[in-house]
Amino acid sequence: MSQQVLKENRLTEELLLEGAKKVGELAEQEAKIADEIASVSAKVVSLMESTGITQMMIPKNQGGPDIGLRTFAKVVRKVANYNLSAAWLAYLYPLHNMLPAYLPRKGQDEIFNQGGLIADIFAAIGTAEKDGDGYRISGKWNFVSGVNHADWVGVGVKIVMSDGDGKPEVCLPIIPVSELQIVENWDTFGLRGSGSNQVIAEDVYVPLERIFRPEQAEKTRRPYEENYEEDYPLYHVPLFPAFYFGFPLIALGGAERMIEEFKKQTEKRVRLMDGVTESESPRSQRVMAEITMEFKAAEALMDKYLELLENYEKDGATTSNAEFFAIRTKIVKATSEIALRILLTLGGGALYKGGPIELFFRDILSVATHKTSLYEDSVAAYGQELFGFESGVRG
């Protein structure tokens, strides 16, 4: 379950996209069994590691390849064209594996040198008791995606830090999986292959240098040390909007595949009631045109989102978290509506379990249920801010 960091920095966009295609194809081949056992296989994760996908966002000064956000986005979307559970992990593993970049150098070196994959859960529902220079962590957390193949897990707790403002702040102590209990309770409607199981910690000691402080990272957008990699892309963007940007990409990749499948199935479909080849019918032609336009609009919003991230500091750090939230959820909402339109147009034949329409439909709707994808929450927050009120959302 460990990865070898690419010290020679030879990963390119072309190689990563080739790797993403291989990962996606393997995950699609294994989709039925992943659905049954509620986890992608170790083979899929191993391929993510060997192709460099899990390492691609590690900073250069820790042996990473210096990959930008747009390349990251292309990789995630490519995997999602084949399987959304695999794309979920192809997004979260490299994202989580950059978390040590915000730790003190001692913590960075320990985790990066060990080389294992990192899972996390931000929900601050655990407890932390001070013990010398560290904390003893206890708690029970659900929805820990990819934990089956991880070596480390960051778990959410609230801690009053000695150099803070005296108020509890959300922190993520990063704990070796060997010191946690994993409970396989992931039994859901969709994204079943993500293996988002429960973890339990009981009085686990974590030193201070392994405690990630999201609020500090959000405020400064920089690591602890003054001597850091200044052109690392994730040091120049708002933490949470950058942390969540993969979810709409996953939904876009899935919707793109559903449109391809809809076209294929419609071209050979003849309706029994009138004997018309469906591709020649204005009914399906209209649906095809409308979902394609809606998809292109969602793609344009995704491009806008990435542009706002890339130019965040150049624009004076003025783009609000609520605006990022609203754009992201609008994309996911659009893809969900595309998926539903396709299912309802194809009819009962698309319901058979294990078919691409049924599987991608379930998975896209599951992306839409993630707390960072909830459309009603986002537009409420964005509306507040448009009228000059503080929404309080974190991204």
Image: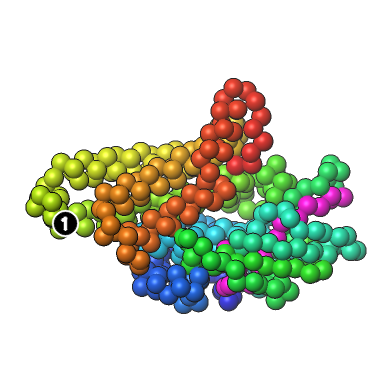
Q: Residues in magenta?
A: 145-162
* Amino acid type shown at disc 1: Arg
> Picture quarter containing residue 81?
bottom left
Q: Is residue 263 above or below residue 333?
A: below
155 is within the stretch colored magenta:
yes
The picture places residue 5, in percent across and down from the top left corner, at 57, 70
> Picture quarter containing residue 29?
bottom left
Q: Is residue 21 visible?
A: no
The picture places residue 202, in percent across and down from the top left corner, at 79, 69
The picture places residue 7, in percent across and down from the top left corner, at 56, 69
Q: Which quarter of the rendered picture does the N terminus lie within?
A: bottom right
The picture places residue 75, in percent across and down from the top left corner, at 43, 58
Residue under pointer 1: 269
Residue located 86% across and 60% down the image: 129
> Picture quarter containing residue 363?
bottom left
Answer with left or right where residue 247 lies relative to residue 20. Answer: right
Q: Is residue 62 above or below residue 340?
A: below
Answer with left or right where residue 208 lies relative to residue 187. Answer: right
Q: Is residue 141 visible?
A: yes
346 is within the stretch colored magenta:
no
Q: Farthest residue to the right: give it.
A: 132
Answer with left or right where residue 92 lies relative to residue 114. Answer: left
Q: Which quarter of the rendered picture does the C terminus lie within?
A: top right
